[in-house]
Amino acid sequence: MIPSARSFIPVMPVLIALLAVPVLSTAIDASPGRDRDRTVRVNCHRGQSLQRAIDRVPDRIDPLVIEVQGFCEGPIQVRRPLVIRGLDPDTDGITAPGDGDAHGQSALVEVFDVPGLGPFSTNGVQFESIGIQLSPAIGLLVSDSSVGLTNVDIRGGSQDALYAAGSAVVVANATGIHDNAGNGVVARGARVVCNACEISNNGATGDRWGVTAMAGASVVLNNSTITGRFGVRATGSDVIQGGGYVNALVRAHLANRGGHITFQNDAQVTGDVWCNAQSSLTSQGQGAGTFGLNQLATTPGSFNFMSVGCAVLSGAPGTTNFAGMTRFGPDAHVSANNGSTIAFAQLDCYAGGTATWVMPGSITVNGVPGVEPDCQP
């Protein structure tokens, strides 16, 4: 049987599409990488466009790997699985456009609607060894996406550095967030994990924090360092400080409006710790001689403050250490049990603040077991 002319009609568009792929690749300097079909290189020194590389390589090539040389001007928007990789966050990455304008975007780098990949939810978007710098807006905005950061540095922006919203999941490893005018990390209903991160000198003025979690967010800080005016705030959200150090000039931790902060693995703190509005602090040691919360000092001239339904709990063997003066106000309560010790340098209870312990748990004040009558139920 001789095929009809109709059966040949689709051939030409298919041939055109196949021929077009290498043309698009060479237009963005797609030098062969480990996988010729999936890796392209963008030389920002030559003025090549990172956004053009993202947009013009066909979506069937996922996850796309882009190797960046130098700093490309943003803003950029990502709506597909990919890896953006440099060699050094000091020399490679994304920087503010020459005119200093965000061009209608909320962030220098935006990631929207890219879920995790595969049965183990591997990050849909991965940034490796790049800098995101000098943003006129938010530095990195992640919305309803799964994003990984490895050896990334977000610095010098005029607003929040990292903002994760909705169902976003962000896992950051060895990542730095420095010298941004807004908050360092904002998690709004999202999940953020920081492993060995350094978050410093963000929010030099106003009520801006190294890390702020809100609207049901979950944030885990493993062996990370946070320094600045304010450290960590949990508002209606959960935060875990696992080891590491929070060093704040004003307030190290604030749990409020139903927020919860957990301290584990010798979580060291300098600066005041506050808890109020039906919130809680939990300290979990790992056995005798270990610390959950280990407060080294309060802010000079200030104090720790627990009030309005705050609960401070220690329910695992080990020690919780509060330095300086700690005040328990209306309906605030501290409790030690299961072999734990809560050690206060000074303790003041008023207007219904109480302290209890269940043997073999204990509470000490300035090294002396027990509390004053004003602190007893």
Image (cartoon, grey):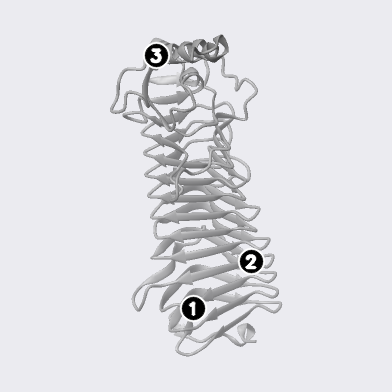
SS category of the residue bearing label 3: helix
Q: Nearer the viewer, mark 3 or mark 1?
A: 3
The residue where tag 3 is placed is 22
What's the residue type where badge 1 is placed? Answer: Gly
Q: Nearer the viewer, residue 133 or 219?
A: 219
Distance, label 1 to label 2, CA atoms, is 17 Å
The residue where tag 2 is placed is 279
Looking at the image, the residue that sits furthest to the front is: 1
SS category of the residue bearing label 2: loop
What's the residue type where badge 2 is placed? Answer: Ser
The residue drawn where x is 52% and y is 74% is 346
Q: Position of residue 324 (x, y in %)?
A: 50, 67
In the rendered image, the vertical position of residue 123 relative to residue 18, given as above or below: below
The residue drawn where x is 54% and y is 15% is 7
What's the residue type where badge 3 is placed? Answer: Pro
The residue drawn where x is 51% and y is 87% is 370
In the rendered image, the vertical position of residue 233 relative to residue 357, given as above or below: above
Q: Position of residue 140 (x, y in %)?
A: 53, 35
User: What is the quadrant of the C terminus in the image?
Assistant: bottom right
Q: Nearer the viewer, mark 3 or mark 2?
A: 3
Q: Nearer the viewer, residue 104 or 363?
A: 104
The residue where tag 1 is placed is 315
Q: Position of residue 45 (x, y in %)?
A: 38, 14
